[in-house]
Amino acid sequence: MTTTRTQTPTPHPSTSDLLTATSFKVLRGEPSPEELAAFTAVLTLRLTTPDATHAPTPQRAATAHWTRPERLRAYACPRAWHG
């Protein structure tokens, strides 16, 4: 007589299971019910969205788009021809 042992897969907790426990705690202030609902909606969306669907962050430009103030002229005459 042989006995086979079947293992039941452990289910991943659902979002509602995660949110039934105390998921977050307000340390300062008294948020309104609308603010708590909006915050809970954002957290729920973040929990249900897989990380692979997020778009990659764009790479920064290779050149700087700022100038150094010490290299600018003190005054630029509006009638002068500058190139």
Image (cartoon, rainbow, N blue to C red):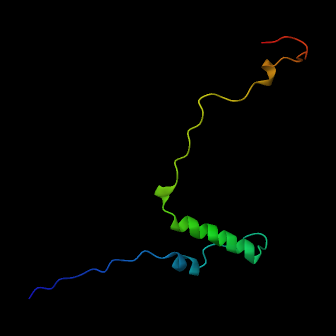
| Residue 46 vs residue 28, the one in the foreground | 46
Residue at 52 percent of width and 80 percent of height:
17
Q: Hey, which quadrant is residue 78 in on the image? A: top right
In the picture as drawn, the residue positioned furthest to the bottom comes out as: 1
Point 57% across, 67% down: residue? 45
Residue at the outermost top position: 81
Which residue is nearer to you in this view: 2 or 71? 71
Q: Is residue 24 left or right of residue 49?
A: right
Residue 26 seen in render: no
Relative image position of residue 59 (x, y in whole percent): 56, 39
Task: Left or right? Give the position of 42 relative to 33.
Answer: left
Quarter containing the N terminus: bottom left
Task: Tell me if residue 23 can be seen.
Answer: yes
Quadrant occupied by the C terminus: top right
Q: At 80% from the left edge and 21% from the top edge, which residue is drawn?
A: 70
Q: Is residue 25 above or below residue 20?
A: above
Residue 28 placed where, x, y %? 76, 69
Q: Is residue 52 left or right of residue 3?
A: right
Residue under the point 74% across and 74% down: 34
Q: Position of residue 46 (x, y in %)?
A: 56, 64
- Image quarter of residue 25: bottom right
Q: Is residue 82 above or below residue 53?
A: above
